[in-house]
Image (cartoon, grey):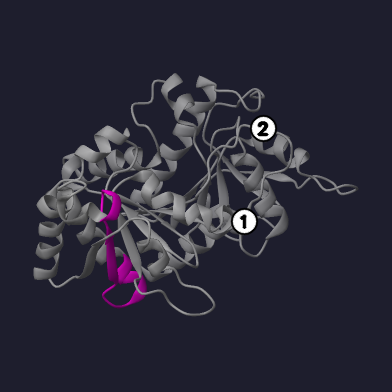
Amino acid sequence: MKPIALTLGDPAGIGPEIIAKSFRDAPDATQGCFVAGDVGTMRRTSALVSESGQPALPVALIANPDEVWNVPPRCIPVLQITEPLAPIPYGQVNGLAGRAAADCVLWACRAALRGELAALVTAPLHKEALAAASILYPGHTELLQAEAAAFLNKPLHEVPVRMMLANDELRTVLVSIHLSLRQAIDAVTFGNVLQTLRITHRAVGASLGRAPRIAVAGLNPHAGEGGLFGREELDTIVPALQAARNEGMDVHGPFAPDTVFMRARSRDGQPGEFDVVVAMYHDQGLIPVKYLGVEQGVNITLGLPLVRTSPDHGTAFDIAGRGQADPSSLLAAVRVARQMAGER
């Protein structure tokens, strides 16, 4: 398999820390992985997370991704992407940090699109830092979509993508991502819902090897209660579901948003009633997955011509620089990325 790039994330947050801990604690899982980032930041972080009485993990500068195979275990290979960074203060919004983090993602995305990488696993960005760096996109998903569209020489709307958050118990795909709640409600259109179902059917079906059973959450309490609490279900969501069924998809709903996730949850070795839930907006879909355990959640971008995964948490400025961050979600993202790359 080709190498997997781990992008640096915001250097003021916990991204570099969870990367360093992953190489420290799981050398087998990180074999074939390298950091697309900054050598100085990773050396500083390696010293931060060094265990009592143990030397810090060495950081090896590599000249190209293929050199990762020559780096021994428990050594952090880094491809220098940014200009060398001076130490960034932890836990503070910083435009320089936002620019460096975005540059690492752009490089890795372009390398993956050229076929040089098996996948990219992205450490967390900070949206305010991106804005401070005059980055036009609010997060990874939108930035990656724009890069993919440019690479394919297609308009943005012809490269639709969706966010899926998943762990061992639940998968959920979002109709809209980083929008205000008012904008997210307006984004619940026939076309957006049907497009989400198509992307979900194709991507989750490829992973399962069969057509997925898709549950759809309503927008309103009780899924509108027959129009008593809103007509979006009757006027928009139900017609989209019927169109999806006419295309051969196994879709069900819309169901009350406060119960559908319980029905889809797998537990005690027993599968849920559904393979995936399509949620109407960001928090509706992400709260249930994160409640089940941030440490095992993985963010997967569906619809891209490359494999991209990410931990399901943010930059955690409140604990950055303290050595307290848990790398479990990043390691889960590496595992899922490797699996998805192998399925291609």
Q: Could you tell me how far apart the alpha carbons at marks 1 and 2 are, in whole angstroms?
A: 24 Å
Answer left or right for 285 relative to 87. Answer: left
Q: Is residue 244 above or below residue 270?
A: above
Which numbered tag is attached to residue 328? Answer: 1
Query: Where in the figure is residue 126, as x and y percent of width and height?
Result: 49, 32
Residue 115 figure quarter: bottom left
Residue 80 figure quarter: top right
Q: Is residue 246 above or below residue 105?
A: below
Could you tell me which quadrant the C terminus lies in? bottom left
Q: Nearer the viewer, mark 1 or mark 2?
A: 1
Name the residue: 28% across, 65% down: 215
In the rendered structure, which segment of residues is drawn in magenta?
Answer: 204-222
- Regarding mark 2 in the picture, which secondary structure is present there? helix
Is residue 73 something one can see in this rendering?
Answer: no
Residue in front for this viewpoint, 62 or 152: 152
Residue 28 figure quarter: bottom right
Residue 207: within the magenta? yes
- Regarding mark 1 in the picture, which secondary structure is present there? helix
Which numbered tag is attached to residue 85? Answer: none
Amino acid type, label 2: Gly
Query: Where in the figure is residue 168, as x and y percent of width and height?
Result: 50, 67
Q: Is residue 217 above or below residue 281?
A: below
Residue picked out by circle 2: 40
Numbered circles on residues, count: 2
